[in-house]
Amino acid sequence: MSTPGPRERGQSCPCPEVRTRLPVLRWLPRYSLAWLQLDLIAGLTVGLTVVPQALAYAEVAGLPLQYGLYSSFMGCFVYCFLGTAKDVTLGPTAIMSLLVSSYTFHEPVYAILLAFLSGCIQLAMGLLHLGFLLDFISCPVIKGFTSAASITISFNQIKNILGLQGIPRQFFLQVYETLRRIRETRAGDAILGLACLAALAGLRAMKSRLPRAACVEPLAARVSYLIVWTSATARNALVVLFAGLVAYSFQVMGSQPFTLTGSIPRGLPAFQLPRFSMAAPNGTIPFRSMVEDMGVGLAVVPLMGLLETVAIAKAFASQNDYRIDPNQELLAMGFANILGSFVSSYPITGSFGRTAVNAQSGVCTPAGGLVTGTLVLLSLAYLTSLFYYIPKAALAAVIISAVVPLFDAGIFRTLWRVKKLDLVPLCVTFLLCFWEVQYGIVAGVLVSGILLLYSIARPPIKVSEGNVLLLQPGSSLHFPAIECLRDAVCSHALAAASPPRCIILDCRHISSIDYTVVVGLAELLQELRKHGLSLAFCSLQDPVLQVLLSADLEGFQHFPSREEAERCGGADPGGGGAAPFTSTSESLLLPAGLIQ
């Protein structure tokens, strides 16, 4: 996508603001037939992946299977016009389906309303440029969540592999009930499920080890490569198709050893507003009660959806040399979820697996999503009657195969080697996600925030003692850190057997300070002066120097370098001392208790 833009080729070009908000205008004027061919191939390949995954992820979300397909086409269309990454595909994912299951009580009305509200929140965040909020979700929290989700989702599908019915969805109860009823396993489902898992693992391994065919090789070699690559890439569709044919064969023979998916309504979903209330046996659940029921999910779902999309987009953008705008991704996600809710979609996000397939298929622009979305619509219109024969064990194998790579066992060893303290939010998130997903994410973010605040409140301070006491903070000073600095100065200057000739504060690493720090420094200067000691500042950066000069600190001394400060020994540098901090014009800067 490095072809010269329309302005460079002498064509008229929309204003920059329009091109920013409609990324399609960046590539559409230079769209070519060669790009169309590659986008068609990529779109068809992703479509063969998304249809079986959509059916499987609806099972994870606890919704009727058709809602997986309803959620799989609108995001493709919207992202084509508003997305900034050519590789990303939007749709249902394992992680988002797990969150939907946690917050919507397996009710389609709740799931559709959650998509609408999540889209509104994402749209508002994009318009307000709040994409930076993602920066506060640390990598250990993300890894802890995805690793726990991998285990939770995989074990949730064990019941379908074994053909068990009536297993609860809460993880610990699920483990207990599955182990207690293991003897009720249906042999047909277990054999088919394990065979599908083995086939998917084999095809995945085959694709990862497949050497790329060079153009100079014989035609037969290139055709063979194309067949193997297509089979491995569309492995989900092939496995589900094979399992469906086996189940249909048994049905024709008059016996059925498998648990089947069952009937799926045929046709496209109606285009209508999501329902803002729901009928219940004891009355109607109003909109306000539905929002209260979803609770923290209204914050977790939009943020996790954006986090997944941006993380995927950035990963592939770095490989293809283009930049991602998180706020534009928020707008794309917002419109996709809002419009998706009009066609009965539950919340969607970027899919790493399908995005990887898209990139490996050679997609050139987001237009490949139009082909994928069209293929899903055709499936809804004409193929739903065939989905009846898909065994649940095959769909369970597709889900397990998709989520197992999310578990990152190496992250524990890596963090132990790099920074052991980061294991705390990782483990907190990982363990609590087995109880409730929202508790794990919120607790992990809180722990990460506490660790961040602690590092701000207790910055590293390098101390060199002698005739001159030198202290060098390792980072900027903010209000929680001033007490730590004062304690370090006083403990070394006042508790020493022979007090230093002067005290020097090397500020080369301090880029900003706040009012509380200024007040604390004023108190420190006063306290040292009572003991006959002076404090000199050196290597102040201009913004910090301007703040301290404007504060008129009494006894404030500044030297351009540490060497000059040590040479002067804390003496007033040529009449450069500031006016008393308690002057009438400046006394309002200090609390009343500090004015002498």
Image (cartoon, rainbow, N blue to C red):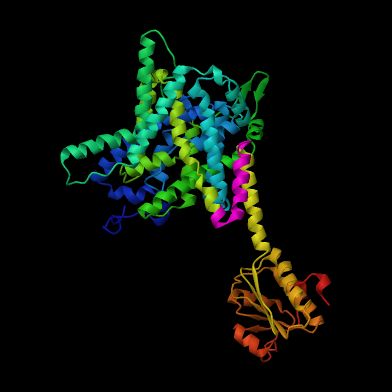
Q: Is residue 347 visible?
A: no
Tell which of 246 and 525 is nearer to you. 246
Residue 178 magenta-highlighted? no
Image-quadrant location for residue 91? top left
Counting every numbered tag in the picture gives: 0
Q: Which residues are magenta?
A: 416-436
Tell which of 231 and 92 is nearer to you. 231
In the image as oriented, which residue stretches furthest toward the top?
Answer: 254
Q: Does residue 255 sit above or below 276 in this rendering?
A: above
Tell which of 203 and 25 is nearer to you. 203
Residue 533, how many percent across, how many down?
76, 83
Q: Does residue 370 sit above or below 393 in this rendering?
A: below
Residue 421 magenta-highlighted? yes
In the image as oriented, which residue stretches furthest toward the bottom?
Answer: 574
Which quadrant is home to the C terminus? bottom right
Residue located 28% across and 57% down the image: 4
Q: Does residue 257 sit above or below 62 in this rendering?
A: above
Tell which of 563 and 496 is nearer to you. 496
Residue located 38% across and 54% down the image: 322
Residue 131, how many percent across, how many down?
53, 51
SS majority, magenta: helix
Residue located 37% across and 30% down the image: 199
Residue 239, how many percent across, how many down?
37, 27
Residue 374, how many percent across, how many down?
35, 32
Q: Is residue 450 visible?
A: yes
Judged left or right of residue 403, residue 25 is left
Image-quadrant location for residue 193? top left
